[in-house]
Image (cartoon, rainbow, N blue to C red):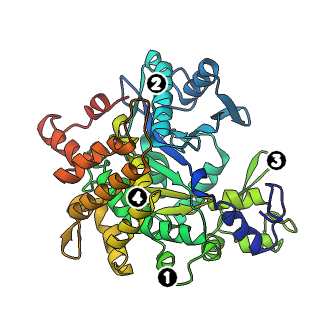
Amino acid sequence: MSDASSSSTVITDKAQLISYLESGNKPKDQWRIGTEHEKFAFCDESFKSLKYDGEKSIKMILEGLANRFGWTPGYEGDNIIALTDSGASVTLEPGGQLELSGAPLETVHDTCREVHAHLHQVKEITEPLGIHMLGMGFNPKWGQEGVNWMPKGRYKIMREYMPKRGNLGLDMMTLSCTVQVNLDFSSEQDMIHKFRTSLALQPIATALFANSPFSNGKPNGFLSYRSHLWTDTDPDRCGMLSFVFEDGMSFERYVDYVLDVPMYFVYRDGKYLDASGESFRDFMQGKLKILPGEFPTLKDWDDHITTAFPEVRMKKFLEMRGADGGPWKSLCALPALWVGLLYDQSALDAAWDLVKDWTDEERQLLRAEVPEKGLSAVIRGQKLQEVARKVVEIAASGLENRGRTDAQGRDEVHFLNTLMETAESGVTPAEEKLKAYHERWNESVDPAFVEYAY
């Protein structure tokens, strides 16, 4: 990685930041799959979100996982806020959403086993406490009045800054859940090909996984309200990144974008220092107001990259960010979709052929319409459902070409079954829940906490 080889390396030159991204280049046999998913923890008797501390609490879950299953706890001050084990971690989102960030694994079979093992462990801890998990893109019942903020310093800074840049940032932080997958690239050219293809297709994933039609106990007019939140969170750090499709896209171009994203914080001596609104470019010149004369380290850059929230984000890998959180059975479908599309060259080329002549205006319009319309959105006179069918078919062919089988001889294609059903019917998970709300649930969202609990 040239001179930017360790987290303590001092950064004074943009070339070091470019080298950091370039160090993500890996030969195909070293490509891995890293899956992340978030879920809401709630009390069985009230459906209320958990507080951090107390008899039924987030802290009890974390301590239970550490004590019973050997996860290594991480602390901020005296508060346990994270767990790590064999390359995986369990962390807390601002409103107590519990997140598993999986280890980099070789196959969708592996990452699915990891998800199942984690959820079984969580269930073993929570069920005796009268706690369950809910997989949806947005909390269907409670608004900000029901939020219990987690004791993490970075969240306090973001909580104070976000309302200055948009109206829905706090809801995004505390009331939403997603499922994501992180995937590798082999070169700058491969990164660009994958970035463009996945970014253009991100609204299709949003539609297929749309699962957030309720807020404050009622339909909110959207199928993916979680996706809508990002349109009014912070224009400096969200969106479809038009420049990715322009001539001149490169690692350096992405570095320039992240350098233009205003900072949130700097982490020093176990504490988060408020640098909200300041410039990382100034930091590289020793001109940061809160740390005059001090220069950033590679760890500071790594932290700063995580404060950009586009639909696809680059670190040393590409992160697919368009999907709502969902039920247990759907969590393996998201990595299967993107691995099928991006890890087989013929599938990647076919997926790009679907979208390569879409204009920036068309991509932006689709991004804007999908949260409300889902698979009924239209692109070039064609229902998005038709595009989704083709996309899922291409993903299936990519997984078939990979030929990665489990102990029973099954390849990875079956993980797409739930998406095949959605693409074929045109009915998203959100629309299934809306139908239940009006017909079986007597216009109450409470049954969601029973039917979709895990």
Q: Earlier in the sequence, mark 4 or mark 3?
A: 3
Q: Nearer the viewer, residue 357 or 17?
A: 357
> Which SS class for mark 3?
loop
Quick check: marks 1 and 2 in contact, CB under 8 Å?
no
Amino acid under disc 3: Asp
Residue 191 showing in the rendered view: yes
Q: CA distance from mark 1 to mark 3?
A: 41 Å
Mark 3, residue position = 269
> In the picture provided, is 187 more to the left or to the right than 388?
right
Q: Nearer the viewer, residue 445 or 333?
A: 333
Quarter assignment of residue 369: bottom left
Q: CA distance from mark 1 to mark 4?
A: 22 Å
Mark 4, residue position = 341
Mark 1, residue position = 246
Query: Crowding near pointer 2: few (<14 within 10 Å), some, many (20+)?
Result: few
Work out which quarter of the rendered image holds the N terminus and state it.
Answer: bottom right
338 relative to 354, above or below: above
Eye-nearest disc, 2 or 4: 4
Eye-nearest disc, 4 or 3: 4
Eye-nearest disc, 1 or 4: 4
Name the outermost residue toward the right. 293
Name the outermost residue toward the left. 439
Quick check: marks 2 and 3 in contact, CB under 8 Å?
no
> Which SS class for mark 1?
loop
Quick check: marks 1 and 4 in contact, CB under 8 Å?
no
Work out which quarter of the rendered image holds the C terminus and state it.
Answer: top left
Name the outermost residue toward the top. 128
Q: Earlier in the sequence, mark 1 or mark 3?
A: 1
Mark 2, residue position = 120
Q: CA distance from mark 2 to mark 4?
A: 29 Å
